[in-house]
């Protein structure tokens, strides 16, 4: 299953994919592969995105942060 996070800045007309990722297929809701997740208080003034890569066991292998 794939999860996408779409965002449209105030005053703009088009939405952009700014996050999301994939879950495993066996129904355990484990994240797999590359993920981009928004900060808990993501808003117009604080736009931090956390990046991570998850292995097949749902364990994070790499991570980073980016300001949009």
Image (cartoon, helix red, strand yellow):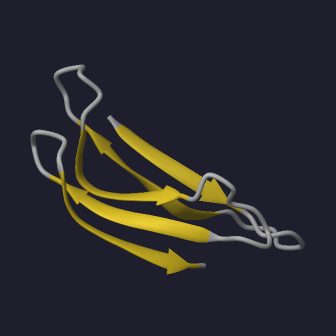
In the rendered view, does 31 fall on the left or right side of 38?
left
Q: Is the N terminus in the top left, top right, bottom left or bottom right quadrant?
A: top left
Which corner quadrant of the image does residue 8 belong to? bottom right
Q: Residue furthest top?
A: 27
In this picture, is 22 found above or below 15? above
Between 26 and 55, the residue placed more toward the observer is: 55
Q: Residue at x 71, y 71 (%)?
A: 46
In the rendered view, does 47 fall on the left or right side of 22?
right
In the rendered view, does 52 fall on the left or right side of 32?
right
Between 39 and 68, the residue placed more toward the observer is: 39
Q: Residue at x 10, y 39 (%)?
A: 57
Between 19 and 67, the residue placed more toward the observer is: 67
Q: Residue furthest right?
A: 11
Q: Residue 31 appears at what percent x and percent y? A: 27, 42
Which corner quadrant of the image does residue 13 belong to? bottom right
Q: Residue 10 appears at what percent x and percent y? A: 86, 69
Q: Residue at x 60, y 79 (%)?
A: 68
In this picture, is 64 found above or below 32? below
Between 18 and 54, the residue placed more toward the observer is: 54
In this picture, is 38 found above or below 56? below
In the rendered view, does 43 fall on the left or right side of 59?
right
Q: Residue at x 52, y 67 (%)?
A: 49
Q: Residue furthest left?
A: 56
């Amino acid at each position: 299953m794939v999860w996408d996070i779409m965002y449209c800045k105030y005053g703009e007309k088009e939405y952009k994919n700014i996050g999301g990722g994939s879950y495993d297929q066996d129904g355990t809701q484990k994240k797999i592969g590359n993920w981009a997740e928004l900060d808990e208080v993501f808003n117009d003034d604080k736009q931090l995105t956390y990046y991570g890569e998850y292995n097949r066991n749902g364990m994070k292998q790499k991570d980073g942060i980016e300001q949009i």
